[in-house]
Image (cartoon, rainbow, N blue to C red):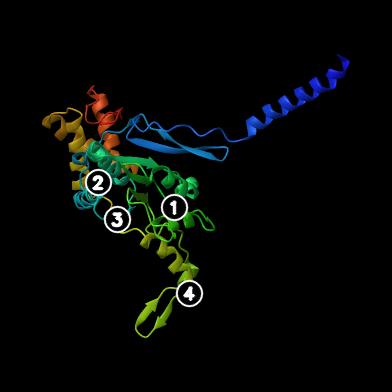
Amino acid sequence: MKELEPLAHLVGRVNALIDRLEGVLPPAPKAIDWDAAIAFRWRKVNGRGWLQPIPRVSNIKLSNLQGIERQRQTIDRNTRQFVEGVPANNVLLTGARGTGKSSLIKAILNKYASKGLRLIEVDKSDLVDLAEITDLIEKRAERFIIFCDDLSFDEGDASYKSLKVALDGSVNASSDNTLIYATSNRRHLLPEYMHENLEYQHVGEEIHPGESAEEKISLSERFGLWLSFYPFDQDEYLAIVDHWLAAFGCNPKEIAAARPDALTWTIERGSRSGRVAWQYARDHAGKLGKPLHATIKALPAKKR
């Protein structure tokens, strides 16, 4: 049996090598359970990506979002057109932090999930996989929003080119069942520098931007709809506080008594936004011992 010993040794080394390779190679793609959720997240490990169901999503409603009626109506109309299979636009939501940009998209998902709307959340670092994602869903009957939250790019970041191609620029026609909704604090998504002003040229009475500015503007212009969000004034902020306190079960007397404290809260935070109003309402309602209201707390995101 001595003549078999070298072979056994070789087999052992091959098995050891296979074990080491398995730790390096990408895992096998996972089957997508489309019935597990109404929202998914693009995950990536060792170079291979898959759609991971999000079992719990916020069940916030459009009626919970105060002070952004025009933006709410516009994105509602656009999404309704999309779900009904008529032309609709990609949407860029930009402006002040904490004013409801991301919450608006979650509320839209909740409203139209029963009509086949689904959401796929994609991190900025994974935008290079947009073509792969659209290939996975292009034959599905559902309508998909690809959601990029808090989107911005640093100087020299080439991943924005993948987004430009996905929005408008690929030889392939865009999929009819996919739109891109993105939020950002920057209007043009890319940093803008003082020295770029030197590139502007005067042509007669007109001012024409230079190549650097044109490149940055061209990305945001590929979104068919722009929705701008602005800081709230004091009355709007207090109205939002009132709304959330009522949602937590506070009575009118308790809401009125909370207003001075709500103003102190926003001064201490240095911000007057819907997010700050929500955070104050949670803190105050908790101190009063109010239970979580059914329209606020997260619920399982089962197929509807």
In the picture, the disc for residue 75 is none
Q: Is residue 52 above or below residue 233?
A: above
Alpha-carbon span between mark 3 and mark 2: 12 Å
Relative depth, front residue between 60 and 247: 60
Q: Is residue 138 left or right of residue 27?
A: left
**Considering the numbered disc 3 on the image, is that residue within a helix, a strand or a loop?**
loop
**What kind of element bears circle 2?**
helix
Q: Which mark is residue 198?
A: 4
Residue in the image at 48% along x and 45% along y: 126
Question: Please, what is the three-letter code of the amino acid marked with disc 4?
Answer: Leu
**Which residue is the site of mark 3?**
89
Badge nearest the viewer, 1 or 3:
3
- Please identify the residue farthest to the bottom as the structure is shown: 204
**Residue under numbered circle 2:** 83
The answer to which image quadrant residue 297 occupies is: top left
User: Earlier along the polypeptide chain: callout 3 or callout 4?
Assistant: 3
Drawn side of residue 24 relative to residue 34, left or right: right
* Mark in the foreground, 3 or 2: 2
Please report whichever mark, 1 or 4, sits nearer to the chain's N-terminal start.
Answer: 1
